[in-house]
Image: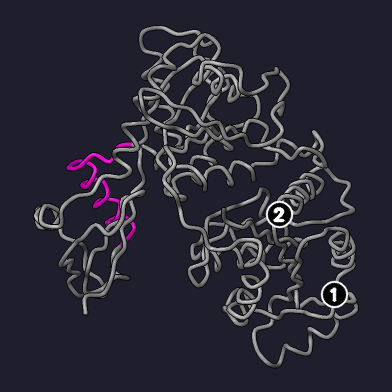
Amino acid sequence: MKPIIAIVGRPNVGKSTLFNRLARRRKAIVEDVPGVTRDRNYAEASWDDRPFILIDTGGFEPTAKERLPQQIRDQAEVAIQEADLILFLMDGKEGLNPTDIEVATFLRKITKPVFYVVNKIDGERQEENVLDFYRLGVSNLHSISAEHGRGVGDLMEEVLQALAPAFPQEEKTEEGIRVAIVGRPNVGKSSLLNKLIGRQRAVVDAAPGTTRDAIDTPFTKDGREYIFIDTAGIRRQSKITKRLEKYSVIKTLRSLERCDVALILLDGYEGLTDQDARIAEFAEESGRAIILLVNKWDLVEKDSSTLEQYKERIRREVKTLDYVPILFISALTGQRVAKIFPAIQDVVAEHRKRISTADLNRWLRETVESYPPPLYQNRPLKIYYISQVAVGPPTFILFTNEPKGVSEAYERYLQRRIRERYGFDGTPLRLLFRQRK
């Protein structure tokens, strides 16, 4: 299990910038205006080969009364309660702020590691700005520049040391196909689990959040072993009120990083929501095989073209998941639920599929000749060789003269051509570009 690290702090102290640096991608929107990050942003990340889940929260203001700051506060509170370690970020240019003091007072009440981090310390001249923050009564302050990377390595070294005792390196054991049923509250996850295993395993209620914690259910069907991870409540047993419940997706993240296949359940009556798309995006980033299940299909008024129109709408709204199979089901009536097990077997086979190096390089020659990569800095970009180095998800290394010259558009082209030749339905692909020595 991977630890969860949450970045909290008042607006515009650089949380999203630190998030992007640790996640090694420009995933969070970064603007020099307070309050740009409205929702929690999360990603799988690693430092020195130690993986963790990273959460970027909106600006955390404990005394906020207005509706939007209150919602951001709620989300940050969920992250704080669910995370294993907190990075409390402050602004070294502005100095200690009354809101920083309020946040620090709140954080003293929690019984988990908190790192007090002073950001925007870009060089030795700014180090004296850190002295003001010792008024918080904290003995150990960490000065960094999230924008330039200064001090981030030292900070993360101590963070990983603090997490190491509770999260030792684990060896993955084969114990059947691990399937996570994920989605928003009240889309029918518990009903689906009960229908799949043919008995009442999870409590079903019309109220959102009836299931209070993730449940692992071993199950054998047709000689194959499965472990279902039901995350129906997506909230803790206690402490998180109904006011906070709609924000909490952290248990979903926990379940996704433990599973082989993610069954992402959508409400067919309500359609695809932003939270559905974010959950699907995280499943893809986590490298899990994915099946989209449109539930409550029995309640949808339809004609002969409704199903295809619904599929097209999902593909249009989440374009990056055009390779994911979509099933239309009713967990209540059992309609098409029997098709889920064959679909799981199909995507697991694709997730674990390996292509020979000779075959891949024949494909590469044809693909590059058909559409050569564009020039990079007025020089030809050459891709010499490809090899599959891992499965689950399928991962390929491509050797080139200029790894930085491979554009996102050309990488998408290569992925599309791989899928055209080899399939890989329901599984994300990883392409890694390396310099040929």
Q: Secondary structure at mark 1?
A: loop
Quadrant holding the C terminus: bottom left
Our reading of the magenta stretch's main secondary structure is: helix
Residue 419 vs residue 90, the one in the foreground: 419
In the shown orientation, is residue 337 left or right of residue 252?
left
Q: Is residue 155 above or below residue 300?
A: below
- Checking the image for residue 96, the label placed there is 1
* Residue 422 lies in the magenta-colored region: yes
Q: Mark 1 touching mark 2, by CB under 8 A?
A: no
Q: Point out residue 126 in the picture as x, y percentages from the top left corner.
A: 72, 88
- Residue receiving disc 2: 58
Range shown magenta: 407-425
The residue positioned 26% from the left and 74% from the top of the image is: 435
Q: Is residue 18 visible?
A: yes
Q: Amino acid at mark 2?
A: Gly
Answer few, some or many: residues within 10 Å of disc 2's Cα (few below 14, many 20 plus, some between 14 and 19): many
User: Label 2's element?
Assistant: loop
Q: Is residue 140 magenta?
A: no
In terms of depth relative to the viewer, which is nearer, 5 or 280? Answer: 5
